[in-house]
Image: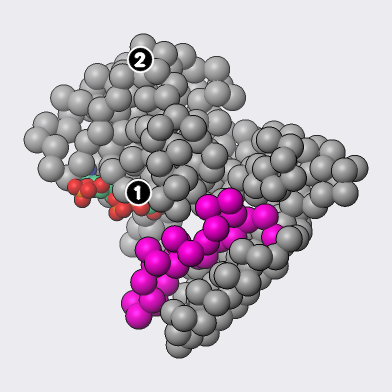
Amino acid sequence: MAATIIDGKAISTATREKLKQQVTDLGTKGIRPGLAVIIVGEDPASQVYVRNKVKACVDTGIYSEKHEIPATTTEEDLLKLIHRLNDKKDIHGILVQLPLPKHINSDRVLETISETKDVDGFHLYNVGALVTGNTIFAPCTPFGVKVMIEHLGLPVEGKSAVVVGRSNIVGKPMAIMLLEMNATVSICTSRTKDLKAYTKMADILVVAVGRPNLITADMVKPGAAVFDVGMNRLADGKLAGDVDYDGVKEIAGYITPVPGGVGPMTITMLLANTVIAAERAHKLK
Ligand code: NAP
């Protein structure tokens, strides 16, 4: 039987409706969550991402400000801006759009954002909090997958979860979150000897690699829930994930399409983290 297609847009819309209500409730207490987005340079893709983030804030009732900095800016000037935003009372979350120009040390920039405003969840403090089961801000993309799993009511406890990819922004935090949900977790990388042997065991399979068609139908356990994080621009201009969607949807129990699967959840979870940051700043959480 063909898989249930997971509608990321619908889950994202439902999640945003709940967030709007939370923002309204905070408004009655005189609190308006605020997000500052910093973009350095004129990378067209980054500009689109930033525009979408600002629009999502507006639509949800979150205050937002965009700081556009020329690519020639010094690291020192960027750090000064972050310090200023760290001190601003109406800003609860700060996001620096990556990648940064080569002359700027991204790690130093991310560590300069106050851990209380680190809505991307990349600060070492928040990584430590996640790993020790005290999550404050979870990185947005794996957080989105977690919310999708919960929304669908998929069983996780005692299940076999396999995460393909070990980046700091997706693979590693995803694996930790699944572990927290009491799955038995394996992480596969480019060095994994027999990828299929692992993926075939997975009740929950999350793929975050950046290689179209890496996961084919013969690599998937019948009935598995497959979350395709990959976003690959094909030669014909179309967007594709890492999973052979047409083949795998005939085997899996659930599958996310690309586009329209995991992608729409990422910005939504940024909004969720901004609301959490505002609640924490006002000691409501
Ligand atoms: P990344 O930092 O490049 O990491 C890719 C990971 O894939 C690495 O850990 C790498 O292993 C592993 N890998 C490479 N080839 C492999 C293979 N043949 N078998 C198994 N593992 C392999 O990528 P990322 O930032 O996590 O992003 C991954 C994909 O997700 C990209 O397509 C990206 O565009 C997409 N993405 C989507 C969203 C969204 O909102 N939907 C958000 C973030 C990223 P090694 O560590 O051994 O090199």
The answer to whether residue 240 is seen in the rendering is no
Residue at image coords 69%, 48%: 281
- Observer-side mark, 2 or 1, equals 1
Q: Does the residue labelled 1 lie within 8 Å of ligand 1?
A: yes
- Rendered location of residue 157, percent (x, y): 41, 13
Residue at image coords 63%, 56%: 93
What secondary structure is found at the residue carrying circle 2? loop
Residue at image coords 40%, 41%: 128
Q: In this view, does 29 lie to the left or right of 189?
A: right
- Rendered location of residue 261, percent (x, y): 51, 39
Which residues are drawn in magenta? Answer: 91-117
Seen in the picture, residue 5 relative to 154 is either above or below; the reply is below
Please identify the quarter of the rendering in which residue 64 is found. bottom right
Q: Name the residue under label 2.
A: 159
Q: In this view, does 224 lie to the left or right of 21?
A: left
Locate the N terminus by quadrant.
top left
Count of numbered circles in the view = 2
Work out whether mark 2 precedes mark 1 in sequence or the reverse, and give the earlier one. Answer: 2
Between residue 132 and residue 35, name the one nearer to us.
132
Would you call the spot at circle 1 few (<14 residues within 10 Å), some (14-19), or many (20 or more)? few
Would you call the spot at circle 2 few (<14 residues within 10 Å), some (14-19), or many (20 or more)? some
Is residue 114 within the magenta segment?
yes
The amino acid sitting under disc 2 is: Lys
As drawn, the residue found furthest toward the bottom would be: 72
Q: In this view, does 84 lie to the left or right of 59?
A: left
The answer to whether residue 150 is seen in the rendering is yes
Between residue 276 and residue 205, name the one nearer to us.
276
Residue at image coords 36%, 11%: 158
Q: Mark 1 points at which residue?
A: 168
The amino acid sitting under disc 1 is: Asn
